[in-house]
Amino acid sequence: MTTIVPVILSGGAGTRLWPVSREAHPKPFMKLQSGESLLQATFLRAAGLAGVTQTLVVTNREYYFKTKDELDAVSDRAGRKHVSFLLEPMGRNTAPAVALAARHVKELAGDAAVMLVMPSDHMIADAEAFQAAVNAAIAAAKQGRLVTFGIVPSAPETGYGYIEAGSALGDSAAREVARFIEKPDYPKAERFLKQGGFFWNSGIFCFGVREILDAFAEHARDVEDVSEPAWAASLATNTNTLHTMHIDAETFQRAPNISIDYAVMERAGNVAVVPGDFGWSDVGSWRSFADMIAADDDGNKVIGDAVIVDAHNNYVNADGRLVAVVGVDDLIVVDTPDALLIGHREKTQMVKSVVEQLRLRDHESARLHRTVHRPWGTYTVLEEGTDFKMKRIVVKPGATLSLQMHHHRSEHWVIVQGNAEVVNGDAVLRLTKDQSTYIPAGNKHRISNQDETDLVFIEVQTGDYLGEDDIVRFEDKYGRVENKSAAALPGAKPDGK
């Protein structure tokens, strides 16, 4: 029996879904109306496919602990199937990710295994139709084909690339690929729809490990010449296991930034497409996200607490406070604790430009939410000024912050829930509710939660510089004590606590 291994590609900032999706909390972690994140929904979909016993998740090493927490939360529903992680030190698009994933799957299941590559941030409404399409793709992959999934178009969409299908492959649902087409203008997209035989390029793929590695070797030597030594260097690191593999950063930084479509699929001669109509959406904008929500009698779609008066066809996403919408139509309103988005529903693709402007201004809201996830728990910025910052910090049971020090700031910790073990300089303290400690700049310090319930404390920072990069780590159970070469690599970012 052929081994099927879903490979979930999880990453990307999802800038068109700001302010919910941000660089440090990207689109796959966005919650759906069901309460599941996009990542969890994808993982459950993959785990539920016939014959699947293990899954590989490819993500950035910064997202590893949050990703693992997300999947652990639904592991019972997934049948506790085995999950492995391939952790990239930086983003290099889908071709290098797939090339390394193929090597990982080869180690896990052999080169006769079939990979089903799925983005983590798509939605699929019809699981039965998707399973049928997967079955057809697996059959074609076993015949040596590199398979992509084409979506039956419902409108002359200009935001997607298209695939023109050629001849049928025997009795299979799979067809030859005649050509790939870049995102068309509206008249051309309209013509594709009327003519038939054209499908949206979904970004979902299926191929044998042996076949895709051969394709990289033949058609994408620049990817192959980096992925092979990067994998060898990663295997040689004694801190890695096949369950959790950190890709060697020094080698991987040389990988080209290129998609699997450009690197292989558009160049190879053994490519097939499986057309599908299984309720697919790439959730690429607030409009497409809103399309998944049921509307009221006036066409309004609401998540959270909102009051709608004499307003029609609006989408309102209210996070934590009441939002009132009066006398307006066709708006997207997304409210978060530190940022508010208001835009026309026909202009949601332009949200990406907002993020570009925020990055030019080095604005923190392009990267972080007010509540930030860390391996040990979360912190929420309550208030800040030029020389002070207040945080509410939650430490998970059994978790501990790194042993660290700061050059420019002092901190005052006040316990409000639970019991803490604190290292403050040479002292080791046991603190409980209403007790506190002051940590001067330059003191090594750490806080641990050895209880079975959350530890909550308030941190007050004072100093002339309060950036998250004012931190020197000495010990860290989550492997975040960076060596000098890793910290200097392109894409490395400061990581508080």
Image: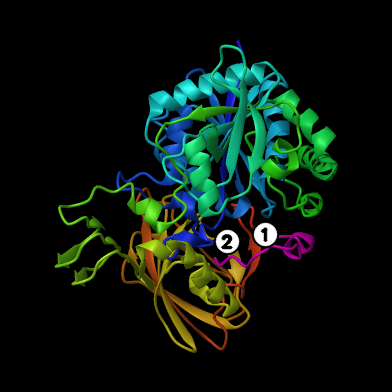
- Which residue is the site of mark 1? 481
Q: Which residues are magenta?
A: 482-497
Q: Position of residue 45 (x, y in %)?
A: 44, 31
Q: Position of residue 412 (x, y in %)?
A: 45, 78
Residue occupying the point 48% across, 40% down: 193
| CB-based contact (under 8 Å), mark 1 and mark 2 | yes
Q: Nearer the viewer, residue 481 or 70?
A: 70
Residue occupying the point 40% across, 46% down: 37
Residue occupying the point 66% across, 54% down: 91
Q: Is residue 484 magenta?
A: yes
User: Residue 402 got which mark?
Assistant: 2
Q: Position of residue 15 (x, y in %)?
A: 51, 61
Question: Is 418 left, or right, of 153 in this rendering?
Answer: left
Question: Is 135 left, or right, of 154 in this rendering?
Answer: right
Distance (Cα) linking label 1 and label 2: 9 Å
The picture quadrant where one finds residue 205 is top right
Q: Amino acid at mark 1?
A: Val
Q: Nearer the viewer, residue 415 or 133?
A: 133
Residue occupying the point 21% across, 62% down: 312
In terms of sequence position, does the residue under pointer 1 or pointer 2 come before the other?
A: 2
Q: Amino acid at mark 2?
A: Ser
Q: Main SS of the magenta segment?
A: loop
> Against 463, is 319 above or below?
above
> Element type at marker 1?
loop
Q: Residues within 10 Å of mark 1 (few under 14, many from 20)?
A: some
Q: Residues within 10 Å of mark 2 (few under 14, many from 20)?
A: many
Whether residue 248 is visible here, answered yes or no, is: yes
User: Residue 213 got which mark?
Assistant: none
The picture quadrant where one finds residue 436 is bottom left
